[in-house]
C-alpha cells in the first residue's frame, strides 16, 4: 500500500502540472487560429518536441517494447522505417507546408489547406478529408485510451474501465481549457519526461543484468534468433513482404494531421532546421531505447508475459528496479506518451469538424467564439466515441495504431507531398487520392490481410497513382490556382537559409 501511495503521489503531481498548463493557457477571447494553431507562435523546441511526443504515443513505451520482447531485434525494422520517415518528413514537408498554409489564406487545418490550395468551389476536398480524419482519429485515440487503461490497471490494480475514464477525463480537461497552446506546452513537458523514462529503464536493466555482454549471452540462450533481423525469436522467418511492411511505417508520416499541424504552427520557417535536428535526435535515441526495453525485459522477467500482456514490460521493469516514487515518475512518462498523442488527435479532429463541416456547411457566418465553443463540444464527443472503441481490455495497442496510421498515411500522404511539389495537380486528382487511399486501407485491412502486406503500402501506392492519373487526364488548373502556387514558391525561396 505504501509503495502504491508513492506512485500515486508522483502521478497526481504529473496530472496537476498538466491541469495547471491548461489553466494558464486558457483564453476566453481566443479565435480558431489561436485555439487550433496557437497563433503560429511556437518556437523550434516546442514544435519539435510536441511533434514527436504526439507522434510516438503509448505505443513507443508499451507497443514497441512489447513487440521487441516477443520478436527480438527484428523489431528494429519498425524503428528504422520511423526514423527515416521522421527525417524525410521534416526535410521535405515542414518548411513548404508552413509557408503554403500561411500564403494560401492562412489555412489552420489540413482540409482547409487542401480547399485553399485547389480553390475547390464544391468543398468536396474539405468534406472527404474531414470524414477520414474523424474516422481514423476515433480509432487512433482509442489506442491511447487502451494504453491508459492498461497502465492504471497494472500500476494500481484499478479496474480497466475505470482507468479508461481517468485517462480520458484528464486529457479532455486540459485540451478543452487551453487548446493547441496547452497541448503543445504539455507535449514539451511530456516529451522530456518520456525521454527520461525511456533512457533510465533500459540503462538500469543493463546494469542489473551485468552489462551488454551478459545480456547478449542470456538472450542467445533463450533463442539464437533473438539477434536476427530476418527471423523472429520463435524461429519464424521474416519474409520480404514482412520487412517491407515494417519499413512501410515511415510512409505514414506524410499524412498524419496531428504531426503536420505542428509544421503549420511554428513561428518562423527559418526555425525548421533547428527543430529538425532536435526531432530526429529525440526519435533515434527514443526508438532504440524502446527496443532495448523489450530485449532486457525478456532477460529480467523471463517468458512470463503472453499476448497483449507483453505490452506492459516497461511498467513491470520500472516497478522492479526503482523506488515507488521514481517508478511513479516513470509511469507518468508513459502517461505522457499516451496523452501527448490523444490530446493532439482530439484537437485536430474537433478543429477539422468545426472548420470543415460546421463552418463550411452549417454556419458560414459563425463567430470566432462560437467556433471555439463548437470545437470544445466536439472534443467531448470524439472522446466518448473513442472510449466505446477502447472497452475491450485485450486490444493490442500496436495493432490499433497501425490501422489508423495506415489510414492517414494513405489518404493524405501522397496528397500532401504532391500538393507541395506538383504545380499541375488538380482538384479532381486530389479528391481521387483521398478516396482511393482511405478506402484501400479499409478494404485491404478487412479482406486482404492474409497477404501479410501492411495496408499502408498498397494504400499509399494506389493513392499516388490515382492523383497522377486523374490530374493528367483532367484539364489544367485554373490560372488563379497556379498563381497562388507560384506565390507560395516565391515566398519559399525568400525564406531559404
Image: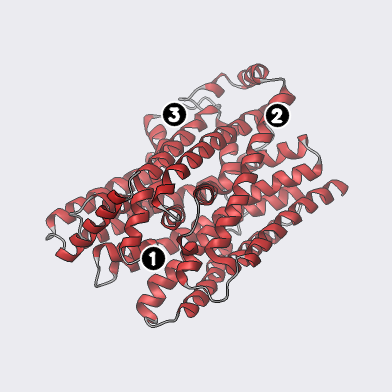
Q: Tell me the residue that label 1 is attached to.
A: 130
| Residue 310 visible in this rendered orientation of the protein | no
Q: Nearer the viewer, residue 80 or 365?
A: 365
Q: Quadrant of the C terminus?
A: top left
Q: Residues within 10 Å of mark 1 (few under 14, many from 20)?
A: many
Q: Tell me the residue that label 2 is attached to.
A: 205
Horizontal and vertical percent position of residue 202: 66, 31
Residue visible at 64% across and 53% down in the picture:
148
Corner quadrant of residue 257: bottom left
| CA distance separating discs 1 and 2 | 45 Å
- In screen coordinates, is 13 left or right of 406? right
Q: Secondary structure at mark 1?
A: helix
Q: Secondary structure at mark 2?
A: helix
Q: Tell me the residue that label 3 is attached to.
A: 238
Q: Nearer the viewer, residue 158 or 452?
A: 158
Q: Earlier in the sequence, mark 1 or mark 2?
A: 1
Horizontal and vertical percent position of residue 144: 58, 54
Residue visible at 41% across and 40% down in the picture:
85
How many discs mark residues in the rendered view? Answer: 3
Q: Nearer the viewer, residue 485 or 359?
A: 485
Depth check, mark 1 against mark 3: the one in front is: 1
Amino acid at each position: 500500500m505504501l509503495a502504491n501511495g508513492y506512485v500515486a503521489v508522483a502521478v497526481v503531481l504529473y496530472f496537476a502540472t498538466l491541469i495547471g498548463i491548461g489553466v494558464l493557457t486558457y483564453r476566453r477571447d481566443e479565435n480558431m487560429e489561436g485555439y487550433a494553431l496557437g497563433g503560429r507562435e511556437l518556437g523550434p523546441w516546442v514544435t519539435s518536441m510536441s511533434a514527436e511526443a504526439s507522434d510516438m504515443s503509448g505505443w513507443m513505451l508499451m507497443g514497441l517494447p512489447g513487440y521487441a520482447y516477443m520478436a527480438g531485434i527484428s523489431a528494429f525494422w519498425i524503428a528504422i522505417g520511423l526514423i527515416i520517415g521522421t527525417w524525410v518528413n521534416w526535410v521535405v514537408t515542414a518548411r513548404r507546408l508552413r509557408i503554403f498554409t500561411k500564403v494560401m489564406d492562412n489555412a489552420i487545418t489540413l482540409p482547409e489547406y487542401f480547399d485553399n490550395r485547389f480553390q475547390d468551389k464544391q468543398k468536396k476536398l474539405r468534406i472527404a478529408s474531414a470524414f477520414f480524419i474523424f474516422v481514423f482519429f476515433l480509432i487512433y485515440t482509442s489506442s491511447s485510451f487502451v494504453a491508459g487503461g492498461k497502465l492504471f490497471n497494472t500500476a494500481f490494480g484499478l479496474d480497466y474501465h475505470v482507468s479508461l475514464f481517468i485517462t480520458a477525463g484528464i486529457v479532455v480537461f486540459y485540451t478543452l481549457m487551453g487548446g493547441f497552446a496547452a497541448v503543445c506546452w504539455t507535449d514539451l513537458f511530456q516529451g522530456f519526461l518520456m525521454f527520461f523514462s525511456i533512457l533510465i529503464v533500459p540503462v538500469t536493466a543493463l546494469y542489473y543484468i551485468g552489462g551488454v555482454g551478459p545480456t547478449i549471452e542470456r538472450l542467445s540462450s533463450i533463442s539464437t534468433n533473438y539477434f536476427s533481423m530476418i527471423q523472429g525469436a520463435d524461429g519464424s522467418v521474416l519474409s520480404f513482404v514482412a520487412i517491407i511492411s515494417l519499413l512501410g511505417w515511415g510512409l505514414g508520416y506524410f499524412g498524419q494531421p496531428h504531426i503536420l499541424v505542428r509544421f503549420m504552427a511554428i513561428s518562423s520557417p527559418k526555425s525548421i532546421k533547428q527543430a529538425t535536428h532536435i526531432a530526429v535526435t529525440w526519435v533515434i535515441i527514443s526508438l532504440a531505447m524502446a527496443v532495448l526495453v523489450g530485449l532486457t525485459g525478456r532477460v529480467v522477467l523471463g517468458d512470463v508475459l503472453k499476448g497483449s500482456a507483453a505490452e506492459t514490460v516497461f511498467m513491470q521493469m520500472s516497478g522492479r528496479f526503482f523506488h515507488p516514487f521514481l517508478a511513479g515518475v516513470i509511469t507518468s512518462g508513459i502517461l505522457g506518451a499516451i496523452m501527448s498523442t490523444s490530446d493532439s488527435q482530439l484537437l485536430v479532429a474537433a478543429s477539422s469538424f468545426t472548420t470543415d463541416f460546421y463552418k463550411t456547411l452549417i454556419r458560414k457566418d459563425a463567430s470566432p467564439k462560437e467556433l471555439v465553443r463548437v470545437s470544445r463540444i466536439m472534443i467531448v464527443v470524439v472522446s466518448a466515441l473513442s472510449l466505446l472503441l477502447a472497452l475491450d481490455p485485450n486490444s493490442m495497442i500496436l495493432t490499433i495504431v497501425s490501422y489508423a496510421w495506415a489510414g492517414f498515411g494513405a489518404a493524405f500522404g501522397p496528397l500532401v507531398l504532391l500538393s507541395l511539389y506538383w504545380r499541375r495537380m488538380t482538384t479532381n486528382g486530389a479528391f481521387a487520392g483521398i478516396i482511393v487511399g482511405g478506402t484501400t486501407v479499409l478494404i485491404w485491412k478487412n479482406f486482404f490481410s492474409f497477404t501479410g502486406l501492411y495496408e499502408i503500402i498498397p494504400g499509399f501506392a494506389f493513392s499516388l497513382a490515382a492523383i497522377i492519373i486523374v490530374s493528367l487526364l483532367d484539364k489544367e488548373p485554373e490560372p488563379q490556382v497556379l498563381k497562388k502556387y507560384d506565390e507560395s514558391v516565391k515566398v519559399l525561396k525568400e525564406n531559404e537559409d
